[in-house]
Image: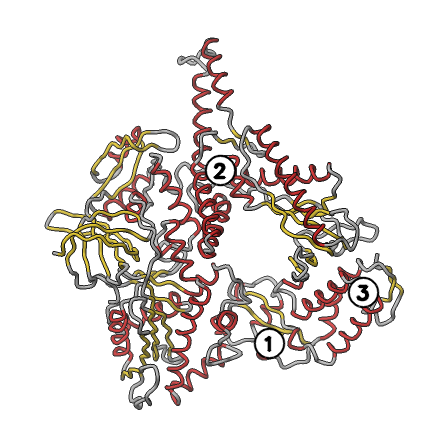
Amino acid sequence: MVPNRVSSGFVVHSFIQQSRRGDTANMRVCLLGRFADGSTFAVVDDRISAGFYVTASDLENALQKAGSTPFVTSDENYRTIYGEEVAFLSWDSSRTLLAARNRLEHHGMRTFEADVSTAERYLMDHHLHGMITVTGESNPGHHVDHIFKNPELSPCEEEPALVVSSMDIETDPDSQEITTIAICTENPFDLVRREEILFQRKGAPALAPSPVPVRVFSSERDLLSGWIETVNEHDPDIITGWNVVDFDLRMISRRLQANALPFAIGRSTEHARFLDGGKQGSPRSHVYIPGRQAVDAMTVARRGPQRFENYSLETVAAAVTGEGKSIGSSSVSEKLETIRNLYRHDPQALCRYCHNDAVLVQRILDHTGLLRLTLKRVTLIGIPLSRAWTSIAAFEFTYIEAMHRRGLVAPTLGVDTLPSGAAPGGAILEPAPGLHRNVLVFDFKSLYPSIIRTFNIDPVARARETTRRRAGADVAHKTDGTGPMHDEAATQREGREATDEPICAPGGACFSREPGILPEILSEFFVRRAEAQAAGDSVASYVYKIIMNSFYGVLGSPGCRFAGAELAGAITGFGQALLHWCRDLLTSKGYRVIYGDTDSLFVLSALPAHTAPAALHSLGATLCEEVNSALADHIRQQYRLTSRLELEFEKAYDGFFLPAVRGRVTGEAVRGRAKGYAGRLAPADPAGNAEVEVVGMEAVRRDWTDLAGMFQRTLLQMLFDSVPADTVTEYVHRLLRELRSGAFDEELVYRKQLTKPVSDYARGRPPHVQAALKLPAAERSGIIEYVMTTRGPQPRSVMDDNIDYQHYIEKQLRPVYESIAEAFVTEVPDPFDENPQMTLFS
């Protein structure tokens, strides 16, 4: 027994463990992690009750239908969001608990938090967000350094320091056996970086010495045993890799089973398990490793702030680190053949390749800070590391934890659900097509989170208003139901309504004025994000931003227990009303709003051409201040609320282009195309970059070719520079000549994602599917790269026909040209017409 100690550390894994002594069953929470001094720990707490809530009025019925007798606790500290008293039912067996929950659900009984895991409820109620302080006596353990029984726990706000192992495997394409495993471990408590390569082949020759140690095994079984030994020796908190869950660990799990070996890489006597997505009640595959976590680096990269053309390791590594994989290939089949040859003839090169992939993952995580981003999300929200990037789970954890602080319990998913359905989208103000000069751009800062804070949009606030209205309806009549209540009571009710008037959204949803939970959470996040920005902590700032912005989507998702169409609709309804109100205000001041989308306004400054950028920015700042002041007055007068909304002057364009809708009928009025525009920045700083920004147009869309993007950007630059029309025509003619000569063949590739197996495209096969069918079966997935030839679409990697240049002229270049040419005010021959005719472009 080690005397009482106080240590801070990070909870890597939290779970429930069932134990039994004779006829007595016992459930306990286990928290496994690493202390700040590098030692590992396990906290075991058996002072818990595992169960769920029912309303006090349903208690007798629940006891009859549960199928087993629970322990009953009348909990006066908690109520439902509708104010109902509750009782807590608990069992000493997780299997019995689950059976009782299913029985009550079968009988249509309302339960509360029956789907919240006991481990997560424990974290919520102790307010533990990843980092904790442990106070108590400990014993040494076999798999961890310290074991604490029922210690005192408290939150801690230190930064976690964890041991991270990156791994990669290679398999024999013929036998599917694992041939090579590379492990690279970063240990912040040990200055030595640990790297090992494990290789197996029966009768394999001894490998020459290399900078990274290579252990050679004569069988796959020995290789896997060596891997288990290595993982436990390196003792990582996090195991990562590129697609490490769905490929590396999935394959290892299968091969361990094939070799009758235990998946023994955890920090307990319990073995690890691979849980297949869709088959274990979860949409995503997951690896359960007691005391450790598998974090897929590819998944984390998709959630980060940086966008990539695709999320292959090759692409992301090249963009982030400037390095690529040591084996380049143009196709999956080519890569498999290369690996097959290396395995047979150059095993040392295969080991280097495998090791390089493991190293690249660590370098990506180090360069981008993505792992720190993931850990920061855990410490800010509280969600366990295994579910750090699940939006709904993160929202519910945060919200339910706040509910418990207010003495409220949450409904089980499917209980007390709100009506679902599509909520209205963001407002679109009619775009005015064409070229505009000196345009000011205004943007609401975090519009939807600010609407939630301003108008108290919140599940509990909605439930309270619903309860208030029901109570009002009840007391509006005599208790015997024979008529209206007497005059004195009516007068009292009218007085209460004057002060309790609800906040009603444009769509009709109403909310109590009593401060809601979600606005309170967001207010705290706003403050913490501002603190992070002031401290230069871009990671924390980004985490708060994406968390806050996800709340609207979650409230509209049927997978969230609190979601409902009227909640999401209240947010977008207020958003539409606010955008229109701001447009009308600016119009009343003599300005023209030429476009608006959800939270942005594009306003003609009315300043003359060649106005200095400084004057544009000065006007933008002044207008922004005036709008914010008027908007605050409007919300205070109409809703009796304090505005949390903030319109920002974002930027100014000295040239701004809005394209027209394509394919209009002759004589039809020209209408602008929403969701796409281009503008040349007018930076306030004379040394700033006057770059051309393109949003939503062909130049930034993946389903258009690189040639079309380059062409469009060049035309836009010419448009903003007021280049003469004959110069534009000369440029187009030159481009067409070079295109037909083959100068742009590499820029003619289409890229399109296959969203389902090619066999599922029963009705009609779009070009990328036609191209995919010409690939080997192993390559018919992901993004298909293809080129249009004189014999139709063909994969880029196996193209053997002539390119159809006329297709690219008619389907890529001409549409781009025609959408911009109308803005050139001149009369010139159509450069695409083989028999030029005079054409009026405006």
**Looking at the image, is mark 2 or mark 1 earlier in the sequence?**
2
Q: Horizontal and vertical percent for residue 780?
A: 52, 71
Asked if disc 2 and disc 1 are in contact, CB closer than 8 Å, the reply is no
Q: Residues within 10 Å of mark 2 (few under 14, many from 20)?
A: few
Secondary structure at numbered mark 3: loop
Q: How many marks?
A: 3
Q: Which label's residue is closer to the chain start, 3 or 1?
A: 3
Task: Locate the N terminus and report the quarter of the image it occupies.
Answer: bottom left
Q: Around disc 3, counting alpha carbons within 10 Å, would you say few (fewer than 14), some (14 to 19), or many (20 or more)?
A: few
Specify the amino acid type for callout 3. Val
- The residue under label 1 is 796
Q: Amino acid at mark 2?
A: Pro
Q: Is residue 789 above or below residue 163?
A: below
266 is higher (above) or lower (below) than 615? below
Give the alpha-carbon distance from disc 3 to disc 1, as whole Å. 36 Å
As measured in the structure, the alpha-carbon distance from the residue carrying label 3 to the one carrying label 2 is 56 Å
Which residue is tagged 3?
723
Q: Position of residue 223 (x, y in %)?
A: 28, 78
In this view, the residue in front, 630 or 232, is 630
The secondary structure type at the circle numbered 1 is helix
Q: Is residue 434 visible?
A: no
Q: Residue at x 57, y 34 (%)?
A: 507
Q: SS class of the residue under badge 2?
A: loop
The spot of residue 817 in percent (x, y) is 76, 64
* Mark 3 vs 2: CB contact within 8 A: no
Can residue 36 be spotted in the picture?
yes
Q: Residue furthest right?
A: 838
**Would you call the spot at circle 1 few (<14 residues within 10 Å), some (14-19), or many (20 or more)?**
many
Identify which residue, 80 or 513, lies in the foreground.
513
Q: Which residue is mark 2?
A: 419
Viewer-side residue, 85 vs 143:
143
